[in-house]
Image (cartoon, rainbow, N blue to C red):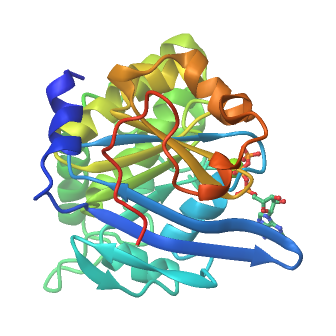
């Protein structure tokens, strides 16, 4: 929130990004969805990824998540070259993605959703013992408290919860998996005012915990409330980067629509900085 947060992420050249991508390109047939995109997010930083429909945001996130394999480019996690060729590779590297459809099971309660597919197994006792249920419940309560998520009960069935609460559970699940980088694709798109507030607060908690967070959003009010930097994509390119404290929604909208650049070639530089953008981005390789 404070400018020092963003400043720390931007200014300390010695800091190593939690996640860095260089020269990522991806085509789907004739559609060039990503063109030479560089991307970086630091520990304890929230980056907003914005752009018009079809700009390539989800494709970029899916590349990080191992759902799409890029045609070209390199990915680094904590400065180490990483090879992500499937979602499990991303998970092992501490990268977790929350998609809009959330993948929660409506008929299960909160505890069981959080542990779905990875129920706490104690070898000596067996997977279905009450002990494990208690341990899972204890951890669930702990993680939700850590993230300041308020629910009627951790034994509430998920279908009885609000959209914001469900989104919070999907995020809490990433924490249980020890995520270091959390990617959120449109986390507030379907939410009302109070629910949006809950999710924005949750994103701030993630930053406080030192996670690197990437938020895709079409809602600039949300972006301006919660991010440290905003990266603008257009037509598959990274077109601009702004320190959130040194820009305005108007500037960001102009970059999204291309008005910022007119018909000029700035946009063609891929990683060009728009007016008002800070020099905080990694330079193109
Ligand atoms: N699996 C796919 N097969 C073919 N084309 C795809 C596929 N995924 C994305 N594309 C195309 O790649 C481009 C970028 O799509 P992407 O979903 O990344 O956009 P976006 O920025 O997330 O847009 P939105 O804001 O609408 O979610 C679009 O032209 C899209 O049609
Ligand atoms: Mg998308």
The quadrant of the picture showing ligand 1 is bottom right
Picture quadrant of residue 70: bottom right
Residue 209, percent across and down? 16, 43
Write the residue at 66% across / 40% down.
51
Q: Find the residue positioned furthest to the right.
A: 30
Left or right: 94 in relation to 62 = left
Q: Is residue 190 visible?
A: no
Above or below: residue 265 compared with residue 38: above
Above or below: residue 123 compared with residue 192: below
Picture quadrant of residue 199: top left
Compare residues 225 and 89 and report the one nearer the observer.
225
Residue 249, percent across and down? 55, 18
Above or below: residue 197 compared with residue 216: above
Q: Is residue 250 visible?
A: yes
User: Which quadrant does the N terminus fall into?
Assistant: top left
Picture quadrant of residue 253: top right
Residue 168, percent across and down? 42, 37
């Amino acid at each position: 929130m404070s400018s020092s947060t963003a400043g720390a992420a931007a200014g300390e050249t010695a800091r190593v990004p939690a996640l860095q991508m260089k020269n990522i390109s991806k085509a789907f047939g004739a559609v060039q969805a990503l063109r030479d995109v560089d991307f970086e997010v630091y520990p304890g930083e929230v980056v907003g990824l914005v752009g018009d429909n079809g700009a390539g945001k989800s494709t970029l996130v899916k590349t990080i998540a191992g759902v799409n394999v890029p045609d070209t480019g390199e990915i680094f996690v904590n400065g180490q070259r990483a090879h992500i060729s499937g979602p499990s590779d991303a998970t092992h590297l501490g990268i977790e993605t929350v998609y809009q459809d959330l993948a929660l099971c409506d008929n299960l309660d909160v505890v069981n959703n959080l542990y779905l597919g990875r129920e706490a197994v104690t070898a000596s006792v067996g997977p279905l013992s009450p002990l494990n249920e208690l341990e899972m419940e204890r951890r669930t309560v702990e993680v939700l408290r850590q993230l300041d998520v308020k629910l009627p009960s951790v034994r509430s069935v998920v279908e009885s919860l609000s959209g914001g609460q469900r989104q919070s559970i999907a995020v809490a699940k990433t924490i249980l998996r020890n995520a270091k980088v959390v990617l959120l694709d449109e986390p507030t798109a379907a939410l009302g005012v109070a629910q949006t507030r809950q999710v924005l607060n949750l994103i701030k908690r993630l930053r406080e915990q030192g996670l690197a967070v990437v938020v895709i959003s079409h809602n600039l009010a949300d972006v301006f409330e919660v991010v440290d930097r905003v990266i603008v994509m257009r037509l598959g390119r990274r077109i601009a980067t702004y320190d959130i404290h040194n820009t305005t929604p108007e500037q960001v909208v102009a970059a999204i629509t291309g008005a910022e650049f007119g018909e000029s070639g700035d946009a063609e530089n891929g990683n060009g900085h728009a007016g008002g953008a800070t020099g905080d981005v990694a330079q193109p390789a």
